[in-house]
Image (tube, rainbow, N blue to C red):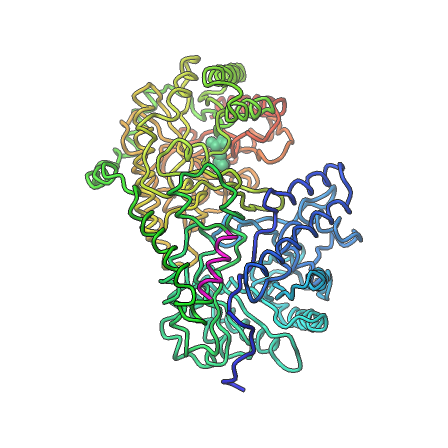
Amino acid sequence: MANSVPSVSSTGSTVLGYPRIGPNRELKRAEEAFWAGRSDASALHEVAAGLRRDTWTTLRDAGLDQVPGNTFSFYDHILDTALAVGAVPERFAGISDPLERLFAMARGRTGAPACEMTKWFDTNYHYLVPEIGPDTRLAPGSRKAIEEFREALRSDVVTRPVLVGPVTLLLLSKPAEGAPEGFRPLDLLGPLVEVYRDLLAELADAGAEWVQLDEPAFAADRSEDEIAALRKAYDRLAAAPRRPKILVASYFGELGPALPVLASTAVEGLALDLVAGASDLDGIDGIEGIGGKLVLAGVVDGRNVWRTDLDAALVTASRLVGVAGRVEISTSCSLLHVPYDLSVETSLPGDVADMLAFARQKVDEVVLIGRALHEGRSAVAAEFDAAKTTRERVAAAARRNESVRARLAELGADHYRRGAGDVRAKVQREALGLPDVPTTTIGSFPQTAEIRKDRAAHRAGRIDAGEYTERMRREIARVVALQEEIGLDVLVHGEPERNDMVQYFAENLDGFATTELGWVQSYGSRCVRPPILHSDVSRRDGNPITVEWATYAQSLSEKPVKGMLTGPVTILAWSFVRDDQPLGDTARQVGLALRDEVVDLEAAGIRIIQVDEPALRELLPLHERDRPAYMDWAVDAFRMSTGGVVDGTQIHTHLCYSEFGEVVGAIDGLDADVTTVEAARSRMEVLADLGPGIPRGLGPGVYDVHSPEVPDTDELAGQLTAALRHIGSERLWANPDCGLKTRGEPETVEALTNLVAAARRVRAQT
Ligand code: GLN
Ligand code: ZN
């Protein structure tokens, strides 16, 4: 049995998953209409069925051998898998309607808060965290995978249903409320695997030949115990008697020590990420069991938007020929993380468009490489050669900006190291004249429907630049007056001109392109349109971006108004970034462009400048061994951006989370004069680490901006008093824990008024 080659169909290509929100975000619209009560469940189901059918037939007609199934989701595929195995937290157990229950788990309802949401590995996708306790009654639950398999059959497509694998599902779960100390969700692996066996048997009965189980958790560092759990799970899942065949897919990195373990089990197929985890190929010929397996060579990048180097991909995949039982071509991971279709973009510069491939184009690439592998390159020579010519042409085109490169080469470390922190603090205290525990906000003020309308009208050319500027200024003046009235110490201009904190800068920097329909699901119905960073970066025509708005706001007040920028790491994290040079080099370029902006703000009289880095922790590599290098370049890029100012100019940074762990060192490395963070929900406990770790100003958010509830003065004063147990009043700032953009105005005014009162009270007591 060991060396028999699993039977497969002809050309040898598939993808691990596909976007599902709809090419025009049809699912988002249908869901939001349903949630708002503007349409009923049957209308929603109809849209969903249409999207599924289109995906299956598109993928089949593109020439893929195998079309992944169960890739549709109303909200999140991890939630779907939890529902498929009956992992429903107690507080939702009473809801009998399946769709209602799904949305309740995703979005919460009165008395039953939503499941927690967190980032899917190092992507910008967010999943709902399953809750598993000793009492979780695991049993086949939702029949979605089976129903969708049958539904696809009716469209004449035999799909390969995809489920999150049992070990990854448990590793991503958290202990349910009330679980005893020491309980780990992984303790339930045994019973969970039996549920998967039942599900697989049902899928086989429905006619599925293959099932794909995703185990990306094994692309991160894993303990021996966890790898042993993987072995145990797949030995059992692959044990007779059973059909269908099992494909275990891992992605976002190499499998490393998990690869020989999976190869030793009786699963029929493995999918490898050969973009992020090409090192799995080294020594793979010595791994026992590989010779009997179908191996999917994930050579087309599922996470980025660049056109594939087809010849290089073919060479990579060819390394498996003669090693694996059979080789097929695939994407490195699901295409969920890239936009649908490049061909609908009409305003991308031609050269930029020629660099790119979105999901639909990547499917074509997969098919072509599959054909080249199985029929020989000559069978697809024309397509390969044309793609190569295009790649070479755009690679040679203007991606380089020599003056940016020359300036970077000149900027040694001493150009971006500032004076000693305590010296700066002293100079700034004199220059700014702020009270102890100064009050401020994180930057954005509530974005009214009117502001959004004005921005859209400007974009569409319905109002001219002069009129637009006028309207934005009016809003800025209003927000400044509001802050004066409230009595805040450090003001902001409110960011009305920004659609999004990254897109706004991308639109004003050379080297970036933005799309019209390049939507990517972030979570549920929420989508983002990441800018595309394709070439060397500098400010467009050398022009300042934010200076006009900031100086206008400053002209209206005697109090300092903070300049407001998005940091280099965050700009990279929320964009599609060129992969032809190390990320750190690109980050330094962005840092340099921001440095120019920071210096211009200072020259224009702005005395406090905030450079937001909410994504600093997000980009942290999955493997510990890669982290020091990451933190080095991240810190370097930030310091590049902020290191050009005098000691008296105060640099702030803002991070949107409260779990710092191993990034405390990096945050300290940023060397900002003031660091604002989320802290309200943890009652200032973060200061236990940050207080000693970051010996400069700290602004732990004293209330949660995600909730519409207005905190009262007592509560806020309590938070500040709690903070003062960790750090002195000369280092403490009082601020909300994030921007106010999504809040309503009345509640914002009330909350900030209470914040100012609380700070005054605490000041009087110290
Ligand atoms: N300055 C931004 C704002 O206030 C920061 C947003 C964020 O941290 N995500 O909206
Ligand atoms: Zn934030």
Q: Is residue 329 visible?
A: yes
From the viewer's perspective, tell me whether residue 100 is left or right of residue 521: right
Q: Position of residue 268 (x, y in %)?
A: 55, 76
**Which residue of the protein is positioned furthest toward the bottom in this rendering?**
1
Q: Is residue 183 visible?
A: no
Q: How many marks?
A: 0
Q: Position of residue 360 (x, y in %)?
A: 52, 52
**Which residue of the protein is positioned furthest toward the left in this rendering?**
410
Which segment did they paint magenta?
A: 359-370
The image quadrant that residue 691 belongs to is: top left
Which of the two residues, 564 or 190, is positioned nearer the viewer here?
Answer: 564
Q: Position of residue 178 (x, y in %)?
A: 67, 56
What is the chief secondary structure element of the magenta stretch?
helix
From the viewer's perspective, tell me whether residue 1 is left or right of residue 33: left
In percent of the image, x 49 and y 57: which residue is there? 364
Which of the two residues, 559 or 153, is positioned nearer the viewer here?
Answer: 153
Specify whether residue 541 is painted magenta.
Answer: no
In percent of the image, x 33 and y 51: which residue is there? 580
**437 to 171, vertically: above or below:** above
**475 to 413, vertically: above or below:** above
Q: Position of residue 709 (x, y in %)?
A: 65, 31
From the viewer's perspective, tell me whether residue 525 is left or right of residue 653: right
**739 to 250, vertically: above or below:** above
Which of the two residues, 765 or 152, is positioned nearer the viewer here?
Answer: 152
- Where the N terminus falls, by quadrant? bottom right
